[in-house]
């Protein structure tokens, strides 16, 4: 057993064990799960020295179709590391959060299974393995999305599952094409041979792969499942969905672009532009929302835009792409950390009220100092406040945009910079909306201490995350050092020095902040709030907007389905009527009347040897039998008659007799000889 | 140590003959007989298992019986194919024995029980002999022993139709043996040897001027062994025999007895005549015709049956068609899959017959119509039945699918695309006659009306052997890659 396979198999084994333990004792199961995830996390940490020295590879042949090929380099390691962290803290948080839900055992089972599949996605070095794990992850996480099993979550679940499966099939199509053209499924090998293909084929493959992975990464216009699914899953599951599962999609896009397509320029631009759309759309939608989870969910979409921007820049920057790659990777890690924190904090609010709408819970956190502080750290992280982790990655992405502009002088990068600022400002605005509504406003309803509905130790994971945010924020250079192996892996040269707290970066950060505060005061406070009976009500105008899912996808799918079903119904009817005709014909033949003539009775006469008498006898007999024949013919309708079916049946019985079998055998032998000698 | 392991194939046959067949009549108490036979069979399975491992590690070996070297003495050649088929035979036999402990007395008279076990030991010994031997006449002797023993386990039920079926089987089968004997006589007159390797040497030398004689003997072997292994138009004895025999016997007949002649036939093709001579003649095309017709017609016949066991019996005819088709393709993959399918079908059919036997035993019905709603009364047993049926229909991962898939690949490889249609139609027909049983068993309000949940289910203790069988079946499907590679390694040395 290799270390990688051990890490990969522990979640699967413990999923089953936790289910068994859980039906016996829930406390033991909770402790067991926390310990298992801790062990996996420690194992992942202990891999670091090896991974930073060399790339680990391991393969087992003869399983999972093409054999299982695992690979661990510093790029994959960063993602595996955040998965380990996310699941460890998520499990810890779940033990506090899930206590009053139904089907707890099922939750843990699928939580751990999703863990295993996600690790598999990040470790797989073979497209088929990757696909298998990817699909497994979609299916098991579906069980997490519909955990509440009310109408809303089932609706979300349908969206999530159908889009995931569609994505999976599209990806599979891409994999088929790749295998057909390059004859290999090893991710590292494909890049070497794919350049020999024509441009069109490369673009088709790229399109299929990026759509397949992009659905998981909530790429525009395939993001429609995201707000629903995130809002309906339990908080720890949402945290994992946003922090880690979203990254599997981005991971896929990165390996498609960098490893498979050798950083193709056109595809890079497409990803880049989709990133810009994602930033704007996600930000605008987030600012409209009233449900805390939906705000953070759309924020995930907007943040994905920043990461796609970075991914696109890997190709655009060419030889300096390593810089963008490191920036993106850092962004992915950072986003995982603060999204875990924010969703868990939202979960704690949910534990009080079972309610997420700002209109109900405004002013709740005014006196919850601890929660307020933790939430604030998360917000400062996400908006990129200097000294918190979001700042570091945003600075790098910004520098990358500036460099691209410097390199190409294209106008698009000026727009990109503008959108970068605008997106940052929108982030500031919706987070400010959330924070002010929940933690700053004074609400008389919530005055005085609310009785705690959770143990204080539920906050422990949040503390850990907050300290990570601050640590990365304060010592980014050290952290970049840990990631820099990735750049060398793809043969990129990296800058020798990383500077974060420069004058420009601080300036741009404060510019974004002030811009964001401006948006908040001008738009949120004026247009998204109605005053009713001295109370502020938040409204969401985006409900009436054009919905991609309801107004575009569903009608298209329905009409396609309708047409196809009509066509097939017609074909089906035609086939059925033909078959019915054949059956009718058969039964008509079967019930065909067959006249059976009565057997002529030739009695044995004693025959005299005299010729005359013989002649007479014969004459007599002939007339006798003539009469019988005539009688039987004239009594045509009274005579014995058999159905054709019965005749066939009677022959069948004869056929299976011993004598006939031997006869048949003889025929077979003769025919065989004829066959073999004639064709010789 | 390796000397000792090389002794194992012969040892297992001797143990079966001495302790299983000749010692048992001396014992009086039934319990001791049962224990003895379970012990013997498990021992044989263990020996086969060790042999398999030995072969996998150190490669094939030749064992001279009584230390007489090849042309004079009898020689066992144990390679991957022989050892894996031997393991399948002894394993399935052990499981069927285990199952029969609980159910045999409900089907046959008490005084016949020990008779049944004696015959089974004799049968397994002769089947293993057919598989292992490298001597053509020795193979014929074992073939005769197996025929008689198989007749015995049909007739053990003492009913009128059993005797009828057994006589039919005996007549046709001895006709087949006669043909084989005739073939051996021809071969012997040409070559003057009985050992397969030596005959092959002589045949190569004589191939050019005695072609007709060789072809005649080839057809004699093909048809003679074809009768014994229920090749399509010669299958007429099979449905009667398999339907009327007690269920454990049906399982053995269908999964072991009709497989051994095929192994013998493959050996004759490849070891005696050699691939060059065979591929110059048209015998493979003949096998393709028989196999293809068997696949379709067997399924069509099965679809019309009203008695459950008869349906399963006809399905065996169709499945044997797959095996002959695989051999008839004449390429390496086809032959590999034919052997893989023997193993797969052996495991699947035995669990299918045993679970059908439990239905019949618990309800007393025989017809398919009466088994509606059986899924509520015997959910576990029908579950096993379903799993096996799904394998035959060809649901991925299960071994039946693996063989169909690879058979399709093999037929593409050999350039006979039209065979794909036959494979597809045949598996469609499989679905047509297996699914109604399953669906009517589990679903349908009318069917489930008045049935009490698990009212007739067997104690789980009695189902363990069938469950083990179906688990091993799933494992064979799951590990198909390594199994197929192992068999392939055996074919390349053949």
Image (cartoon, coloured by chain):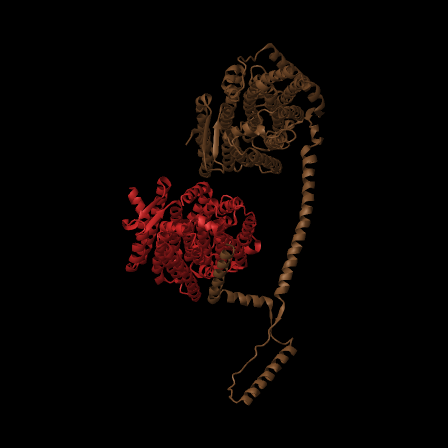
Chain colours: A brown, B red
Q: Locate the N terminus of chain B and report the quarter of the image it occupies.
A: top left
Q: Is A632 positioned to the left or the right of A112 in the image?
A: right
Instruction: Please indicate, yes or no, whether residue B378 appears anywhere in the rendered image.
Output: no
Quick one: quadrant of the C terminus of chain B? top left
Toward the viewer: A165 or A506? A165
Residue nearest the observer in this picture, A296 or A394: A394
B207 or A124: nearer the viewer? B207
Using the rendered image of the protein, determine whether residue A381 is visible from the camera's viewpoint: yes
Q: Position of residue A109 (x, y in %)?
A: 50, 36
Horizontally, is B173 left or right of B422 in the view?
A: left
For residue A552, above or below residue B364: above
Query: What is the x, y in percent for residue A669?
Result: 47, 60
Residue at image point 59% right, 81% down: A625
Number of numbered discs present? 0
Toward the front, the furthest residue is: B209
Residue A165: x and y, percent?
59, 37
Question: Where does the image place residue B242, in percent across and percent down from the top left?
Answer: 45, 59
């Amino acid at each position: 057993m290799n270390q990688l396979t051990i890490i990969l198999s522990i979640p699967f084994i413990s999923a089953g064990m936790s289910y068994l333990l859980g039906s016996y004792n829930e406390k033991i199961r909770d402790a067991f799960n926390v310990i298992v995830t801790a062990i996996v996390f420690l194992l992942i940490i202990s891999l670091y020295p090896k991974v930073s020295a060399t790339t680990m590879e391991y393969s087992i042949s003869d399983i999972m179709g093409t054999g299982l090929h695992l690979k661990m380099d510093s790029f994959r390691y960063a993602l595996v590391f955040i998965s380990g962290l996310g699941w460890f803290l998520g499990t810890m948080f779940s033990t506090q959060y899930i206590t009053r839900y139904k089907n707890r055992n099922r939750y843990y089972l699928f939580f751990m299974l999703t863990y295993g599949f996600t690790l598999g996605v990040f470790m797989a070095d073979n497209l088929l393995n990757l696909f298998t794990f990817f699909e497994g992850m979609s299916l098991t996480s579906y069980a997490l999305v519909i955990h509440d099993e009310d109408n809303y979550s089932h609706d979300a679940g349908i969206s999530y599952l159908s889009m995931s499966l569609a994505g999976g099939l599209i990806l599979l199509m891409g994999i088929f094409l790749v295998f057909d053209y390059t004859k290999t499924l090893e991710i590292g090998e494909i890049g070497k041979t794919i350049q020999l293909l024509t441009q069109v084929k490369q673009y088709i493959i790229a399109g299929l792969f990026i759509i397949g992975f992009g659905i998981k990464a909530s790429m525009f216009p395939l993001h429609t499942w995201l707000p629903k699914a995130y809002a309906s899953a339990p908080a720890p599951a949402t945290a994992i969905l946003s922090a880690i599962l979203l990254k599997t999609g981005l991971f896929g896009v990165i390996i498609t672009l960098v490893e498979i397509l050798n950083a193709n320029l056109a595809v890079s631009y497409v990803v880049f532009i989709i990133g810009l759309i994602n930033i704007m759309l996600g930000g605008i939608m987030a600012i409209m929302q009233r449900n805390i989870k939906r705000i953070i969910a759309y924020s995930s979409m907007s943040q994905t835009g920043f990461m796609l921007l970075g991914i696109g820049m890997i190709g655009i920057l060419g030889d300096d792409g390593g810089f963008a790659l490191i920036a993106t990777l850092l962004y992915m890690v950072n986003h995982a950390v603060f999204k875990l924190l924010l969703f868990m904090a939202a979960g704690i609010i949910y534990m009080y009220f079972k309610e997420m709408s700002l209109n109900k819970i405004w002013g709740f956190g005014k006196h919850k100092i601890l929660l307020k502080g933790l939430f604030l750290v998360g917000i400062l992280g996400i908006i990129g406040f200097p000294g918190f982790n979001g700042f570091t990655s945003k600075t790098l992405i910004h520098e990358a945009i500036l460099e691209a502009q410097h390199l190409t002088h294209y106008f698009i990068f000026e727009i990109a910079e503008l959108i970068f600022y605008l997106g940052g400002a929108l982030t500031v605005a919706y987070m400010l909306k959330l924070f002010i509504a929940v933690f700053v406003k004074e609400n008389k309803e919530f005055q005085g201490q609310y009785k705690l509905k959770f143990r204080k130790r539920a906050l422990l994971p949040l503390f850990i995350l907050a300290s990570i945010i601050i640590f990365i924020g304060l010592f980014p250079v050290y952290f970049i050092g840990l990631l820099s192996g990735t750049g060398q892996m793809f043969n990129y040269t990296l800058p020798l020095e990383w500077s974060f707290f420069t004058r420009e970066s601080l300036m741009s950060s404060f510019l974004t902040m002030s811009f964001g505060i401006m948006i908040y005061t001008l738009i949120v406070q004026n247009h998204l709030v109605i005053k009713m009976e001295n109370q502020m009500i938040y409204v969401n105008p985006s409900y009436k907007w054009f919905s991609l899912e309801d107004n575009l996808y569903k009608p298209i799918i329905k009409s396609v389905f309708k047409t196809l079903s009509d066509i097939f119904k017609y074909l089906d009817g035609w086939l059925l009527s033909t078959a019915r005709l054949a059956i009718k014909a058969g039964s008509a033949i079967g019930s065909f009347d067959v006249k059976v003539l009565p057997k002529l009775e030739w009695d044995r006469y004693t025959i005299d040897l005299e010729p005359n008498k013989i002649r007479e006898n014969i004459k007599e007999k002939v007339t006798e039998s003539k009469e019988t024949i005539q009688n039987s013919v004239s009594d045509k309708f009274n005579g014995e008659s058999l159905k054709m079916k019965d005749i066939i049946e009677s022959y069948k019985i004869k056929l299976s007799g011993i004598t006939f079998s031997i006869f048949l055998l003889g025929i077979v032998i003769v025919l065989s000889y004829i066959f073999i000698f004639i064709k010789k | 140590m390796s000397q000792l392991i090389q002794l194992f194939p012969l040892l297992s046959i001797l143990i079966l003959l001495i302790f299983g067949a000749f010692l048992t009549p001396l014992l009086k108490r039934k319990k001791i007989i049962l224990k003895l036979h379970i012990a013997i069979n498990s021992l044989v399975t263990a020996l086969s298992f060790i042999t398999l491992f030995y072969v996998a590690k150190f490669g094939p070996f030749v064992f001279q019986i009584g230390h007489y070297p090849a042309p004079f003495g009898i020689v066992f050649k144990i390679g991957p194919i022989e050892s894996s088929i031997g393991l399948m035979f002894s394993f399935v036999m052990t499981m069927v024995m285990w199952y029969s402990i609980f159910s045999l007395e409900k089907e046959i008279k008490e005084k016949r029980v020990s008779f049944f076990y004696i015959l089974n030991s004799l049968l397994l010994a002769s089947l293993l002999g057919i598989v292992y031997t490298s001597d053509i006449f020795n193979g014929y002797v074992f073939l005769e022993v197996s025929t008689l023993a198989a007749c015995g386990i049909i007739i053990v039920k003492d009913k009128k139709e059993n005797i009828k079926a057994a006589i039919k089987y005996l007549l046709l089968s001895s006709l087949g043996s006669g043909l084989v004997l005739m073939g051996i006589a021809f071969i012997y007159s040409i070559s003057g040897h009985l050992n397969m390797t030596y005959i092959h040497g002589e045949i190569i030398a004589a191939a050019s001027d005695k072609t007709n004689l060789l072809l005649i003997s080839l057809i004699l072997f093909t048809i003679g062994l074809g009768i014994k292994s229920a090749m399509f138009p010669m299958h007429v004895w099979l449905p009667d025999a398999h339907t009327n025999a007690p269920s454990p016997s049906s399982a053995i007949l269908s999964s072991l007895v009709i497989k051994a002649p095929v192994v013998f036939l493959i050996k004759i093709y490849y070891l005696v005549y050699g691939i060059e001579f065979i591929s110059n003649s048209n015998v493979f095309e003949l096998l393709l015709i028989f196999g293809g017709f068997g696949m379709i017609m067997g399924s069509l016949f099965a679809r019309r049956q009203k008695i459950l066991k008869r349906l399963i019996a006809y399905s065996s005819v169709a499945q044997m068609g797959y095996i002959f088709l695989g051999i008839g393709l004449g390429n390496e993959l086809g032959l590999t899959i034919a052997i893989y399918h023997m193993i797969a079908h052996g495991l699947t059919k035995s669990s299918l017959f045993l679970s059908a036997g439990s239905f019949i035993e618990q309800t007393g019905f025989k017809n398919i119509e009466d088994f509606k709603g059986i899924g509520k009364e015997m959910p576990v047993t029908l579950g096993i039945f379903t799993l096996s049926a799904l394998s035959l229909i060809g649901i991925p991962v299960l071994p039946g699918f693996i063989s169909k898939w690879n058979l399709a690949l093999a037929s593409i490889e050999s350039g006979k695309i039209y065979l794909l249609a036959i494979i597809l139609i045949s598996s469609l027909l499989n679905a047509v006659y297996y699914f109604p049983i399953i669906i009517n068993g589990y679903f349908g309000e009318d069917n489930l009306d008045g049935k009490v949940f698990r009212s007739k289910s067997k104690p789980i203790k009695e189902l363990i052997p069938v469950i083990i069988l179906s688990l091993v079946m799933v494992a064979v499907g799951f590990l198909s890659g390594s199994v197929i590679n192992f068999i392939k390694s055996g074919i390349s040395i053949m």
